[in-house]
Image: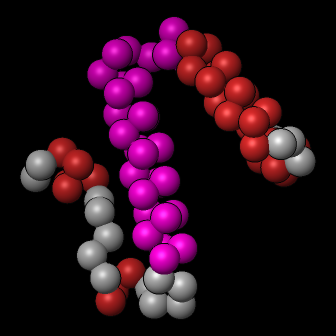
Amino acid sequence: MVNEAESLSVADRAALLKGLVPVVARDMSPKDFESLILELRLKGERFYDASLHPGEGRANRHVIGERDLEGR
């Protein structure tokens, strides 16, 4: 599925994500859906952080984690 989605334009991939939101949300509790969205946000932030620091690895920099987002 991911490989097929990669063949789409970025606009089509964004539309696919937006289209999946109600389908996924309807089968989850609001709290579980919020957790999923936070996980996606975290994955994006980690991706951008790694992109800005190629080859450095996580040990040499602060990488935001679930505890940071949850305030633990």
Q: Main secondary structure of the magenta part?
A: helix
**x and y, in percent, of residue 33 in the image:** 41, 24
Please give the name of the residue rendered at 20% of the width and 54% of the height, measured from the top-left corner.
67
Image vertical order of residue 72 relative to residue 21, above or below = below
Q: Is residue 63 left or right of residue 23?
A: left
Q: Which residues are magenta?
A: 24-52
**x and y, in percent, of residue 57 in the image:** 44, 86
- Marks counted in the figure total 0
Image vertical order of residue 48 relative to residue 7, above or below = below
Q: Colour scheme used in the picture?
A: secondary structure
Q: Is residue 67 left or right of residue 13?
A: left
> Residue 22 colored magenta?
no
Quarter of the image that includes the N terminus? top right
**x and y, in percent, of residue 51 in the image:** 54, 73
Q: Is residue 22 left or right of residue 29?
A: right
Outermost residue to the top: 26
**x and y, in percent, of residue 25 in the image:** 50, 16
Outermost residue to the front: 11
- Say which quarter of the image contains residue 58: bottom left
- Say which quarter of the image contains residue 16: top right
Please give the name of the residue rendered at 10% of the width and 52% of the height, measured from the top-left corner.
72
Please give the name of the residue rendered at 57% of the width and 21% of the height, measured from the top-left corner.
21
- Say which quarter of the image contains residue 68: bottom left
Image vertical order of residue 10 relative to residue 31, above or below = below
Please give the name of the residue rendered at 65% of the width and 30% of the height, measured from the top-left corner.
17
> Residue 36 colored magenta?
yes
